[in-house]
Amino acid sequence: MEDVIIVGAGLSGLTAAYYLKKEGINALVLEARERWGGRILTAHAEANGTPVEMGATWFADKHTYLMALLAELKLPFFEQFHQGISVMEPAGSAPAQLFEVAQNTLPSYRLAGGTSALVHALTRCLAKDRVVLGSPVSEVTDEEDHVEITSTGSTYLGRQAILTIPPFLVYSQQIRFSPPLPEGLPEVMQHTHTWMSDAVKFALSYPSPFWREKGYSGTILSQAGIAQQVYDHTNRENTRFALKGFLSPSAYALPREERKQRVVRQLSGLMGKRAQQYLSYTEKLWKDAVYTHGDYTQVVLPHHNNGHPIFSQPLMNGKLYLSGTETSPVFGGYMDGAVYSGLAAARHILSAAGSCRE
Ligand SMILES: Cc1cc2nc3c(=O)[nH]c(=O)nc-3n(C[C@H](O)[C@H](O)[C@H](O)COP(=O)(O)OP(=O)(O)OC[C@H]3O[C@@H](n4cnc5c(N)ncnc54)[C@H](O)[C@@H]3O)c2cc1C
């Protein structure tokens, strides 16, 4: 029998596991994918290994739970580069407008080495055999003094459990609960937005930051082109160079080659022909990630129901807790919400009456 089982090895689940470990509890983490990190994914460009964020990237001073965790793990970070000329491309045929980001804008930060450095730091603290990859959970049953969790034919028993699967996926994956979840909770889950679950991200890596050399910041905001947002993605050491951003949702329907060509054409039109001399094109279509994205049956607006109070109620007589950034009343949808909710779930477990750990 496990003391605690955590479902999901994204930032929430790993944060919970980390804090429990600090208190002497070796939770078992069950993860559906064959990798850790969930919506945190630092890829490495094919040509020269430039780290490019395909998932979470930025954070700020206001994200106090995340900042405290980074300080505790001694993870260095640096400011997003914005200096120079930025480009705004309006809809229609109006010409692009140039602007500069105001000096007094509050900084946003990126993690040195990529956001996955946070995932690696958290997992380093856990024993390897405490995270079981390739284990999609399909069923959670209340067995009076423990919970039984079923995953691809295996059954795991835990005195307590934390479920960090995004609430909408709990609904869309049809995870079975016995007894059923309390009235109202499945309906809220069905209408809870999963932040960025349909994003299309891309990165182009370059031998040098040609945009900086021409006085551009690398920032492009576009209502006309396939790339809607583009930012400088140079690493902290200034040795690897890339432009990274978000494609329009309609890009999803195009073939990869077409997406790449349109991005390169747009960037070279706005910042010059050297945009064509890229080393690698990397992209990630999160809509295809079944353990992040599910198709909503109705319109669900961004952040809808994120942090809904119903998520904070203990389930199965205090043996099961919901966690995950979408359950967080603090910056729900963002990394800070993931850290907050992981920490909150760990604290519930530690303070739960009757939790028995010899
Ligand atoms: C493209 C993109 C850009 C983003 N940019 C930013 C940003 O700049 N700043 C920011 O703060 N946030 C950003 N975010 C959001 C940020 O990534 C999330 O807030 C955070 O990573 C969520 O962590 P989580 O653990 O709550 O959820 P997840 O990372 O989704 O983790 C849930 C885990 O559960 C697993 N799982 C799912 N189903 C099952 C199952 N049945 N059984 C077992 N495991 C299962 C999943 O595989 C996953 O590992 C971005 C997200 C994306 C996708």
Image (cartoon, rainbow, N blue to C red):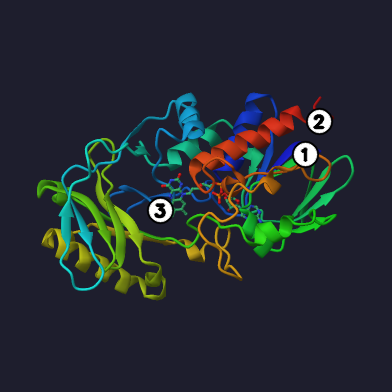
Give the number of the disc on residue 54. Answer: 3
Three-letter residue code for mark 3 = Met
Give the number of the disc on residue 355. Answer: 2
Three-letter residue code for mark 2 = Ser
Q: Quadrant of the N terminus?
A: top right
For mark 3, give the secondary structure.
Answer: loop
How far apart marks 3 and 2 lie (CA) works out to: 39 Å
Q: Position of residue 254 (x, y in %)?
A: 37, 75
How far apart marks 3 and 1 lie (CA) works out to: 33 Å
Closer to the camera, 190 or 34?
A: 190
Q: Is mark 2 within 8 Å of ligand 1?
A: no
Q: Is mark 3 within 8 Å of ligand 1?
A: yes
Q: Determine the image quadrant of residue 145.
A: top right
Give the number of the disc on residue 160. Answer: 1
Q: Position of residue 180 (x, y in %)?
A: 82, 57
Judge whether 274 appears above or below 344 on screen. Answer: below
Residue 127 visible at all: no
Relative placement, left or right, of 356 versus 161 is: right
Q: Counting residues from the N terminus, which is met first, the one under dot 3 or under dot 2?
A: 3
Q: Give the residue at x 69% y 42%.
A: 312
